[in-house]
Image (cartoon, rainbow, N blue to C red):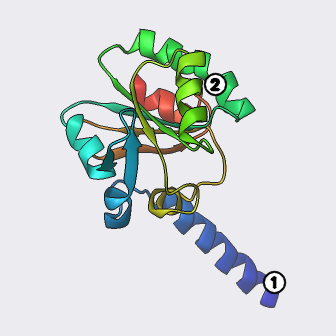
Amino acid sequence: MKKLLFSFLLGSTLLNCQSYKITTFSEAALKDEFITIDENVVPFSAILEQHKGQTIFIDIWASWCKDCRKGLPKVNELQQEFPEMSFVFLSLDKSLGAWKKGIQTYNLQGDHYFMQSGWKGAMGTFLDLDWIPRYLIVDPDGKIVVYKAIKTKDKNLRKYLK
């Protein structure tokens, strides 16, 4: 009986976790501050506002991250395939210098921000960051339609893009 009850509770918990879908950014994430390429500080809400009415592809990456570097050509392919979509890169590099060098080295086209609060800051916590690259898609109404993808071939990411 205990095993049956445990199995039921575990199954219910897993189903509830899987069916829970995050569609809006938390207040803390919206207030988290990012550094622009010109070294100004802006809240994440301003980044979203700048792209209001557009589909936004967000790539959380770092130049030191091997998987991120491997994924960049695929992100570039998405840029070619979906030129109307806005591309926003949020960097978890260790320094501003490394971040800016990475943008140049990999010829990244889009809007760039340094995630100064890091993995454990408000945005990282909201996203429950445990791996990069991490991709999100925000629809023209500001709704998160893809919350967690780590590959550009992710079925949910591709499903939304089609």
Along the viewing direction, whichever of 137 and 126 lies nearer the viewer: 126
Along the viewing direction, whichever of 32 and 17 lies nearer the viewer: 32
What crowding class fits label 1: few (fewer than 14 Cα within 10 Å), some (14-19), or many (20 or more)? few
Asked if one can make out residue 25 in the rendered structure from this viewpoint, the answer is no
Q: What residue type is labelled 2?
A: Gly
> Quick one: SS at disc 2?
helix
Q: Name the residue under label 1.
A: 3
Question: Residue 49 location, x and y as percent?
Answer: 21, 42
158 over 84 or under it: above or below: below
Along the viewing direction, whichever of 91 and 79 lies nearer the viewer: 91
State the image quarter where residue 83 is shown.
top left
How much space separates mark 1 and mark 2, taking CA atoms? 43 Å
State the image quarter where residue 21 is shown.
bottom left
Question: Any mark on residue 71, and which?
Answer: 2
Question: Residue 86 location, x and y as percent?
Answer: 33, 26
Residue at x 22% of width, y 36% of height: 50
Question: Any mark on residue 21, and which?
Answer: none
Along the viewing direction, whichever of 57 and 17 lies nearer the viewer: 57
What crowding class fits label 2: few (fewer than 14 Cα within 10 Å), some (14-19), or many (20 or more)? some
Question: Residue 64 location, x and y as percent?
Answer: 70, 35
